[in-house]
Image (cartoon, helix red, strand yellow):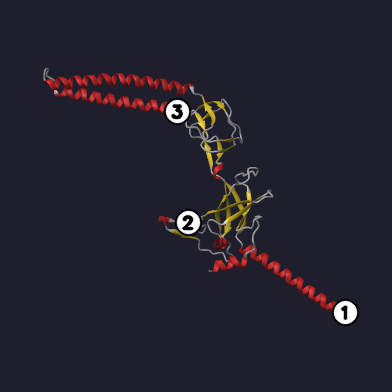
Amino acid sequence: MKAAIAKLIGFLFTTALTAAAIFVGWRLWAYYEEEPWTRDGRVRAEVVAVAPDVSGLVSEVLVHDNQRVRKGDILFRIDRKRFELALRQAEATVANRIAALEVASQDFKRYRTLDAKNNIAVSKQQLENVTGQQAQAQAVYEQALAERDLARLNLERSEVRASVNGPMTNFELRPGSYVTAGKAIAALVDEDSLHVDGYFEETKLPMIRVGDRAAVHLMGERRALFGHVEGIAAGIEDRDRSSGVNLLANVNPTFNWVRLAQRVPVRIALDRPPPDVPLVAGRTATVVIGPDKEGNATFSFFSRAGSARQ
């Protein structure tokens, strides 16, 4: 009798353990397949290429690599002597053009007065000549003003300033280096644009809505960062299609029987991230949509599946 009871207890225990293992495995599989989460996340930011607007020798460098700067801070200066001389020359040209314009204007007024009084015969040709000379002097004067403004702008642009807030990266400029207008010499990461892109399988998109709460687990960090879904990408590249002759669609005739779900970028805006957590553009992260207060997935498979079907 005792042996039979022992066998029964062992059978029931084994059955219960097997059922529990099957249930846990099913829930884990359901979580993996249906819950909106992904390990394929990246910290992203807008990167500004720092490039001077004028060419010249670097006379002073005021920041160093990885230093955080504020918008408007001077990063480095280009030798100003050439630009100061160009501005002085342009200002002298403007003064010369002003004198020439005054002479032309006086001649024009004198001929118009004589023509109106008819005291001295003024030919139509003479009047047209002075009118043209005044117009030409006016145009040359305005051109000199534009050249002066350009020289002043070049002088101002000899000081290269930060256009956004953030850290400088790959900055190895030294005094005496020659920089070329339009050629980038460093990168400036816009820290105000830091966000996380989570690449979710397309099968999980029905459970994601703009505004949903999100948790971000950066690799190497114990704390979770929280945010919300800011947007879902409107399109991804179709690898099986290209443009052929006459811009007609060129579709790949082969078809893979094993179809992998496409990855769609979902942008996560971070809500007040802790200042002591290094948000480095390019860091990998796990992203969970609709987490609990600890940042973990809620295992709400039944509620999500039901809402997705409705």
Measure the C-alpha gap from mark 3 to mark 1.
Answer: 99 Å
* 255 vs 55: above or below: below
Numbered mark located on residue 154 in the image: 3
* Kind of residue indicated by mark 3: Asn
Residue at the spot 71% in from the left edge and 70% down from the top edge: 22
Q: Which mark is residue 208?
A: none
Quarter where residue 134 is shown:
top left
Residue contact between numbered discs 3 and 1, judged by CB atoms under 8 Å: no
**Coordinates of residue 150 in the picture (x, y in percent):** 40, 28
Q: Which mark is residue 242?
A: 2
Above or below — where is 82 with respect to 260?
A: above
Tell me if 277 is positioned left or right of 74 in this view. Answer: right
Q: Secondary structure at mark 3?
A: helix
Between 167 and 214, the one lying in front of the other is 214
Any mark on residue 3, and which?
1
Q: Amino acid at mark 1?
A: Ala
Seen in the image, is 40 located left or right of residue 162? Answer: right
- Residue at 29% across / 19% down in the picture? 100
| Element marked by disc 2 | strand
Few, some or many residues within 10 Å of mark 1 (<14, 14–19, 20+): few
Mark 3 vs mark 2: in front: 3
Q: Which quadrant of the structure image shows residue 121?
A: top left
Q: Amino acid at mark 2?
A: Ser
| Residue 293 against residue 125 in the figure, above or below | below
